[in-house]
Amino acid sequence: MAVKMNKKIFKPKRHSLALQREKIKKDWPEGEFKNVSYKKFIWIVKIKPTYISRSYDIRLECEVNKPPYVYLYGENLKNLECSDFPHIYGRNINKHEVRLCLALPKEFNYSMFIADTIIPWTVEWLFYYEIWLYSGTWYGGGVHPQKKNKS
């Protein structure tokens, strides 16, 4: 006798950007929100990955139906011109900023809290960035999807 299984897949509840902002305010009160609407926000903060580290300027941009983007910018961004600058999605030398690679595209979704994932991942990225500045080797791990060759 065959048993028919219900193929309903559990879909976790997506947290609104308003709820994401409230959790960030609670857990990371030193930051400041800009351009806030129900569809997007920008969060500006200075982060020190360790007590003896310098402070880094971070900009987190969130928009409905897009993953959060995290940018490192400012005077403490060093070695931007290096061709082997590690683990980023892109850089803008004119703006003196890089977009950090913190996760693969499907590793974060809005059922997760940014305050519990993206921001701690940023702190960890900065920790390994400081080691890279000193040693020239990226110890932070991670992978990048291979670009398709256009031939």
Image (tube, rainbow, N blue to C red):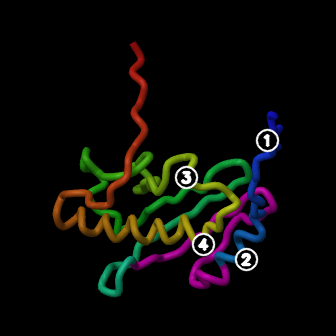
- Residue where numbered disc 1 is placed: 7
Q: Residues within 10 Å of mark 3 (few under 14, many from 20)?
A: few
Give the structural element (helix, strand or loop) at label 3: loop
Q: Is residue 32 magenta?
A: yes
**48 in relation to 137, above or below:** below
Q: Which residues are magenta?
A: 25-48
**122 in relation to 89, above or below:** below
Q: Residue furthest left?
A: 135
Where residue 128 sits: x, y (%)?
31, 66
The amino acid type of the residue labelled 1 equals: Lys
Viewport quadrant of the C terminus: top left
For the residues marked 3 and 4, what is the alpha-carbon distance in whole angstroms? 15 Å
Residue 37: mark in rendering: none
For the residues marked 2 and 4, what is the alpha-carbon distance in whole angstroms? 9 Å
Give the structural element (helix, strand or loop) at label 1: loop
Residue 115: mark in rendering: 4
Of badges 1 and 4, nearer the viewer stands 1
Dots 1, 3 in contact, CB < 8 A: no
Residue lying at 39% horizontally and 33% vertically, measured from the top left: 146
Of badges 3 and 4, nearer the viewer stands 3
> Closer to the N terminus: mark 1 or mark 3?
1
Residue 22: mark in rendering: 2
> Closer to the N terminus: mark 2 or mark 4?
2
For the residues marked 2 and 1, what is the alpha-carbon distance in whole angstroms? 35 Å
For the residues marked 2 and 3, what is the alpha-carbon distance in whole angstroms? 22 Å
With 91 as the anchor, is 118 left or right in this view? right
The amino acid type of the residue labelled 3 equals: Glu
> Closer to the N terminus: mark 1 or mark 4?
1
Q: Residue furthest bottom?
A: 51
> Closer to the N terminus: mark 2 or mark 1?
1
Q: Residue furthest top?
A: 151
